[in-house]
Amino acid sequence: MPRRSYEIETTPKDSVLLLHGMMLMSDFKDDEMSPVFDAYVATIPELRQANILELKEKVAELRLMRPSKEDWVKALSEISSDIVKQKTLVLALDIAMASGGLVDPDEDELLDQVREALGIDLATAEKIVDVLGVKYAS
């Protein structure tokens, strides 16, 4: 199968928002899970060479400026790259499904809000869920 190549033009804020989108769906606050999350973050090309502590501080600043979870989700619409928007949804879904492939109703609602904020249509989101469903099938 041929490999697709994507050219991505991003802004520094895109990396902060990508990490923010991942953190929305993770249990990163749990000290036990933090190393697992950090290892996962290190696999993302845009974040691989980044100073993760610095990016986490910028995410914290963003969250202080936008006090509600609804505002946190809306911030994702500021990602400048369509590819990074899609990647943010893929990663958020992957994190949500990593706990066994099932997403609880609260997570499902949050994921739908994330999808809408990112401007991704439902059909594309369903394709992503189908692929990740194969990944987490047991």
Image (cartoon, helix red, strand yellow):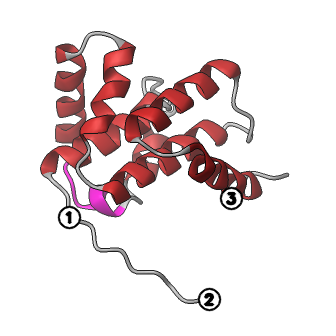
Asked whether residue 119 appears in the rendered view, the answer is: yes
In the image, which disc is placed on residue 131?
3
Q: Quadrant of residue 24?
A: top left
Q: What span is colored magenta in the figure?
A: 45-51
Crowding at dot 3, Cα within 10 Å, few <14 / some 14-19 / many 20+, comes out as few
Compared across the picture, whether 31 is left or right of 102 comes to: left
User: Which residue in the structure is indicated by mark 2?
Assistant: 1
Q: Percent position (x, y) of residue 10? A: 20, 58
Q: Amino acid at mark 1?
A: Glu
Q: Say which residue label 1 marks.
A: 9
Count of numbered badges drawn on the protein? 3
Mark 2, other Cα within 10 Å: few <14 / some 14–19 / many ≥20: few
Disc 1/disc 2 C-alpha distance (Å):
25 Å
Task: Judge from the rendering whether residue 43 lies leftward or rightward of residue 110; answer left or right.
Answer: left
Identify which residue, 107 or 117, lies in the foreground: 117
- Between 67 and 83, the one lying in front of the other is 83
| Residue lying at 33% horizontally and 22% vertically, measured from the top left | 72
Q: Secondary structure at mark 3?
A: helix
Q: CA distance from mark 1 to mark 3?
A: 26 Å
Q: Is residue 137 above or below residue 13?
A: below
